[in-house]
C-alpha cells in the first residue's frame, strides 16, 4: 500500500538521508518530494509501525525527537478534496497533519488571529493565511503536535500517489 509521510521538525535533514532511512526500514519504491520532509513509498506495514520505525531512525539521526505523520495515497487525496479554502491561492492555504482527530474546541484556543480562517478536518486543521504564513502570529495549541504543508505540496503528493 502506498504511504505518504510528512516529517516535521527535520531542520537540515537531507532528503537522501530520509530516503535511505525508508529503504533501510524495508519500504519500497521510495521517493522524496522537495526538501521539506515529504516521502512516499510502498509498505504493507500498519501506519503505526511505519511511524514508530521512522521516528526511531530520525531520532538517532537528529539526536532529538522528530514527529512523523503517515497517510495513504487515498487519504492524501481525501484531504485535498476536503480543503474548505479551495478558492484561495494554494500557497496561502495550509493543512496541519495530525495523528488523531483534533479536539472539537481546538480553534477556540487559537491566539494571534488576524484574518486567518481555520477549519477542522478528520485528522487535520486547515488554515488560510490571506497575508501569508510568514507574517502570521497565529498559534493553535492543538496544531503543535502536527506538521503543516501548503496545498501545493498536498496536491503534488496526492498526484504522485495517484500515478502509482
Image: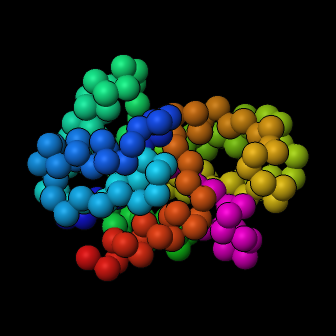
Q: Position of residue 104 (x, y in %)?
A: 61, 44
**What residue appears at the point 64 percent right and 32 percent down from the top-left corner?**
141
Highlighted range, magenta: 83-97
Left or right: residue 46 versus residue 149 is left
**What residue appears at the point 74 percent right and 49 percent down from the top-left corner?**
133
**What residue appears at the point 68 percent right and 64 percent down from the top-left corner?**
91
> Quadrant of residue 65 in the image?
top left
Left or right: residue 53 versus residue 12 is left
Q: Nearer the viewer, residue 60 or 116?
A: 60
Q: In the rendered image, is residue 101 in sight? A: no
Q: Position of residue 113 (x, y in %)?
A: 83, 43
Residue at the bottom extreme of this rendering: 163
Vertical side of 123 occupied by 73: above or below: below
Determine if the magenta segment contains residue 30.
no
Residue at the right extreme of this rendering: 114
Determine if the magenta segment contains residue 94.
yes
> Quadrant of residue 139 in the image?
top right
Position of the N terminus by quadrant: bottom left
Q: Position of residue 162 (x, y in %)?
A: 34, 77
Amino acid at each position: 500500500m502506498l504511504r505518504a509521510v510528512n516529517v516535521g521538525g527535520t531542520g537540515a535533514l537531507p532528503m537522501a538521508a530520509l530516503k535511505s532511512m525508508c529503504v533501510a526500514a524495508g519500504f519500497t519504491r521510495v521517493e522524496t518530494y522537495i526538501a521539506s520532509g515529504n516521502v512516499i513509498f510502498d509498505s504493507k506495514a500498519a501506519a503505526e509501525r511505519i511511524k514508530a520505525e521512522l521516528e526511531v531512525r530520525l531520532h538517532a539521526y537528529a539526536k532529538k525527537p522528530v514527529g512523523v505523520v503517515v497517510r495513504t495515497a487515498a487519504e492524501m487525496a481525501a484531504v485535498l478534496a476536503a480543503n474548505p479554502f479551495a478558492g484561495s491561492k494554494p500557497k496561502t492555504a495550509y493543512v496541519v497533519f495530525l495523528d488523531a482527530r483534533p479536539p472539537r474546541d481546538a480553534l477556540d484556543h487559537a491566539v494571534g488571529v488576524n484574518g486567518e480562517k481555520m477549519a477542522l478536518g478528520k485528522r487535520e486543521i486547515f488554515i488560510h493565511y490571506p497575508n501569508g504564513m510568514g507574517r502570521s502570529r497565529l498559534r493553535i495549541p492543538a496544531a503543535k503536535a502536527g506538521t503543516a504543508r501548503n496545498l501545493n505540496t498536498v496536491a503534488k503528493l496526492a498526484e504522485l500517489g495517484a500515478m502509482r
